[in-house]
Image (cartoon, rainbow, N blue to C red):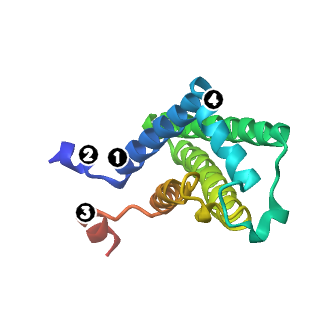
């Protein structure tokens, strides 16, 4: 019963979710470095709006330098978010005090908030709405961005839940 209590706890869920999302974001950043040109082309086409309806072309940015700087900034952001989440996972796994758990919570929150900024702010709001990414049949990353936004939101909700009190704790409180 003790193993089930630990494995089925909110703490175990948060540790696991933090570690999995750290790995995911780390692999995303690594993939963007090792296969640079694939998503670099995505950023170039989204910013240039070359596969969208032509009614809002005044918003387009066609500078290859701006696209490259934007893409490199995305990669750095991804790797920073991954580093925060790996640090958080390490802190969650450490046996320790409330101070350790609060540090872990803050690191997790910061990492997932970075996801919200990147995927919600960068891709959904700016890429999708400002640069009309949704109009492109080829360069529409809305589904992937929304998926990552939801993952981050789940992490943020989990990390800010209060653990349920056990039956023993409820009896002692009464």
Q: Which comes sooner in the sequence, label 3 or label 4? A: 4
Q: Residues within 10 Å of mark 4 (few under 14, many from 20)?
A: some
Residue depicted at 44% across the width and 64% down the height? 162
Q: Which mark is residue 50?
A: none
Q: CA distance from mark 3 to mark 4?
A: 54 Å
Q: Residue 99 or 153: which is nearer the viewer?
A: 153
Q: Earlier in the sequence, mark 3 or mark 1?
A: 1
Image-quadrant location for residue 99: top right
Which tag, 2 or 3, sits closer to the chain's start?
Answer: 2
Instruction: Give the Cα separation between the discs numbered 3 and 1.
Output: 20 Å
Q: Marks 1/2: CA distance?
A: 6 Å
- Is disc 2 placed on a helix, strand or loop? helix
Question: Left or right: where does residue 122 sit relative to residue 172?
Answer: right
Residue beneath disc 1: 12
Quarter of the figure with the C terminus: bottom left
Labels 1 and 2 touching (C-beta < 8 A): yes
Rounded to the nearest angstrom, the CA distance separating label 2 from label 3 is 18 Å
């Amino acid at each position: 019963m003790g193993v089930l209590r630990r494995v089925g706890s909110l703490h175990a869920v948060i540790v696991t979710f933090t570690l999995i999302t750290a790995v995911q974001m780390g692999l995303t950043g690594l993939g963007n470095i090792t296969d640079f040109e694939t998503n670099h082309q995505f950023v170039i086409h989204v910013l240039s709006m070359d596969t969208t309806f032509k009614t809002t072309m005044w918003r387009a940015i066609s500078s290859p330098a701006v696209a490259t700087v934007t893409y490199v900034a995305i990669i750095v952001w991804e790797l920073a978010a991954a580093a925060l989440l790996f640090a958080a996972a390490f802190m969650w796994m450490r046996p320790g005090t409330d101070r350790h758990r609060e540090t872990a919570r803050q690191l997790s929150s910061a990492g997932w908030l970075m996801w919200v900024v990147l995927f919600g702010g960068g891709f959904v709001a700016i890429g999708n709405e400002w640069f009309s990414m949704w109009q492109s049949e080829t360069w529409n990353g809305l589904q992937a961005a929304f998926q990552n936004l939801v993952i981050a939101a789940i992490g943020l909700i989990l990390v800010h839940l209060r653990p349920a009190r056990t039956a023993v704790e409820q009896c002692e409180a009464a």
